């Protein structure tokens, strides 16, 4: 009888230990680690100097004198330097009639150069990749871009591949969310994400001012990064994903149509940015932060926020409302050390910085990224992160918030925790010592600044 009881007890303990281990192992494999990332740096012959930008504008014979002035004013006020890059079709004067090969070559150069370096840096073979995601919003050839990568690197037949299109500048967090959801169902998985944009086939050569803006801000760029949930690779990882929040307000017609690809009155396709875009951005931003705050802020800050909101509700006098509106701003810096802001433009960076109560130091990475690389769409966040790493700002246990906006209209964010001190120069290696420059007055201002007074 004692022997039977002993055996039963041992079996019960083994069962309990097995259940506990499975729960622990499942939880452990739900982590999402960033192993490494590589930002794309095109060759110097693709740089857009002020003279070349002026020539591109003048080449469009459809533009009137007011149109020229409008474009030059946008460029002068853009915060972009002469070190940004464009596709060869535009450099060579073929922006109105790019070939399919032009578009493929632009994307291929970005994908293959960053992936080659990523596999080299991580010492991980392409055949070990389980999941592949590519997000290029406005170019979707067949076979897909993921198929081009699978073919070039001879990946396994069972690799799960996803091509995300139409997601805009906010596609990086969407790709991360997709991978993270896969991680919840698969153990020890390796994922590669390529995030870029194709400028060549989407250059607008009409005269609609709402569509001409994109030509002034968007530049060639991209990034490849590797994610895993394998706990054995944690010691090699740079960061760990803590939370991710997506807000989509596309059910509202104004928000849906404020940033949209369409034809102008003459049938030329362009990307329309309406006057309702700032309003949509604010609404999506507020929706995202409302969900994000409980996930990233310490209990004390959350309690203070609730008390301020209660005071605002209780005291409905005009004076109390004003005070509450001022005091109700959540101090996100109490739960976040660094902010990767989308480089949609100088006005976007300033507006988000004010809304979050950020200092000049906090928004410096986004401002410098806009100056050096321009708006590289969904990959912008990674250039901002690269700036922080090159400046040796990122230390173990620091928390980094990525925040981006995209057509739809969307606002997506994700919070990372730095796992070790980071100091890689990456794409910034050859110029980081020059940043931040003493002044952001660039050659565009010096040569075309007169248009501000015209």
Image (spheres, helix red, strand yellow):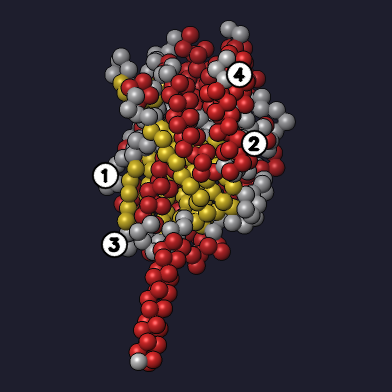
Instruction: Point out the tag, 4 or 3, that comes first from the N-terminus.
Output: 3
Q: Secondary structure at mark 2?
A: helix
Name the residue: 39% across, 70% down: 19
Viewer-closest of 175 and 194 = 175
Measure the C-alpha gap from mark 4 to mark 1.
Answer: 60 Å
- State if disc 2 and disc 1 touch (CB < 8 Å): no
What mark, if any, has residue 414 been given in the picture?
none
Could you tell me residue 334's position as x and y percent?
63, 40
Residue under numbered circle 3: 157
Label located before the other in sequence (2 or 3):
3
In the rendered image, the quadrant that contains the C terminus is top right
Does the CB distance between marks 4 and 2 fall below 8 Å? no
Eyeballing the image, is 271 above or below 140?
Answer: above
Look at the numbered discs 2 and 3 and tell me whether their residues touch, using CB distance below 8 Å: no
The crowd level at tag 1 (other Cα within 10 Å; few <14, some 14-19, many 20+) is few
Q: Which residue is mark 4?
A: 320
Residue 65 in percent (x, y) is at 48, 8
Residue at the disc numbered 1: 142
Decide which of tag 4 and tag 2 comes sooner along the chain.
Answer: 4
Q: Marks 2 and 3: which is nearer the front?
A: 2
Under tag 3, what secondary structure? Answer: loop
Residue 225 spot, x, y in % from top left: 47, 51
Mark 4 vs mark 3: give the one in front: 4
Residue visible at 59% across and 29% down? 308
Mark 4–mark 2 distance (CA, rounded to whole Å): 30 Å
- SS label for mark 1: loop
Report which quarter residue 126 is drawn in.
bottom left
Crowding near pointer 3: few (<14 within 10 Å), some, many (20+)?
few
Residue hosting label 2: 362
Q: Which tag, 3 or 1, sits closer to the chain's start?
A: 1
């Amino acid at each position: 009888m004692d022997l039977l009881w002993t055996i039963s007890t041992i079996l019960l303990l083994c069962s309990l230990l097995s259940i506990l281990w499975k729960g622990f192992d499942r939880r452990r494999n739900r982590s999402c680690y960033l192993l490494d990332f590589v930002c794309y740096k095109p060759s110097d012959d693709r740089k857009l100097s002020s003279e070349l930008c002026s020539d591109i504008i003048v080449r469009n014979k459809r533009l009137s004198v007011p149109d020229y002035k409008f474009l030059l004013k946008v460029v002068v006020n853009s915060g972009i330097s002469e070190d940004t890059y464009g596709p060869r079709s535009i450099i060579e004067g073929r922006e109105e009639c790019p070939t399919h090969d032009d578009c493929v070559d632009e994307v291929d150069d970005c994908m293959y150069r960053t992936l080659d370096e990523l596999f080299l840096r991580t010492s991980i073979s392409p055949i070990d990749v389980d999941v592949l995601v590519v997000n290029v919003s406005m170019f979707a050839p067949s076979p897909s871009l993921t198929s081009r990568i699978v073919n070039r690197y001879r990946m396994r037949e069972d690799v799960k591949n996803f091509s995300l299109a139409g997601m805009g500048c906010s596609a990086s967090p969407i790709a991360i969310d997709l991978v993270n959801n896969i991680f919840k169902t698969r153990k020890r998985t390796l994922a590669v994400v390529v995030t870029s944009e194709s400028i060549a086939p989407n250059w607008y050569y009409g005269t609609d001012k709402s569509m001409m803006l994109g030509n002034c801000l968007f530049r060639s760029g991209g990034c490849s990064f590797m994610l895993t949930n394998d706990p054995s690779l944690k010691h090699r990882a740079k960061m760990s994903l803590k939370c991710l929040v997506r807000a989509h307000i596309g059910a509202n017609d104004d928000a849906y149509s404020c940033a949209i690809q369409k034809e102008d009155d003459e049938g030329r396709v362009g990307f329309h940015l309406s006057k309702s875009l700032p309003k949509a951005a604010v609404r999506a931003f507020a929706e995202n932060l409302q969900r994000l705050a409980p996930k990233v802020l310490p209990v004390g800050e959350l309690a203070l926020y609730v008390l301020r909101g209660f005071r605002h509700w209780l005291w409905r006098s005009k004076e109390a409302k004003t005070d509450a509106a001022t005091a109700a701003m959540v101090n996100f810096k109490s739960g976040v050390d660094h902010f990767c802001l989308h480089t949609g433009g100088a006005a976007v960076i300033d507006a988000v910085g004010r809304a979050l109560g950020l200092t000049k130091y906090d928004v410096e990475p986004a401002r410098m990224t806009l100056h050096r690389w321009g708006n590289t769409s969904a990959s912008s966040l990674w250039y901002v992160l690269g700036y922080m790493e090159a400046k040796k700002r990122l230390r173990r246990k620091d928390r980094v918030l990525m925040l981006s906006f995209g057509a739809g209209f969307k606002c997506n964010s994700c919070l990372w925790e730095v796992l070790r001190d980071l100091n890689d120069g990456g794409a910034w290696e050859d110029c980081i010592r020059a940043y931040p420059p003493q002044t952001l007055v660039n050659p565009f201002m010096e040569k075309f600044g007169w248009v501000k007074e015209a």
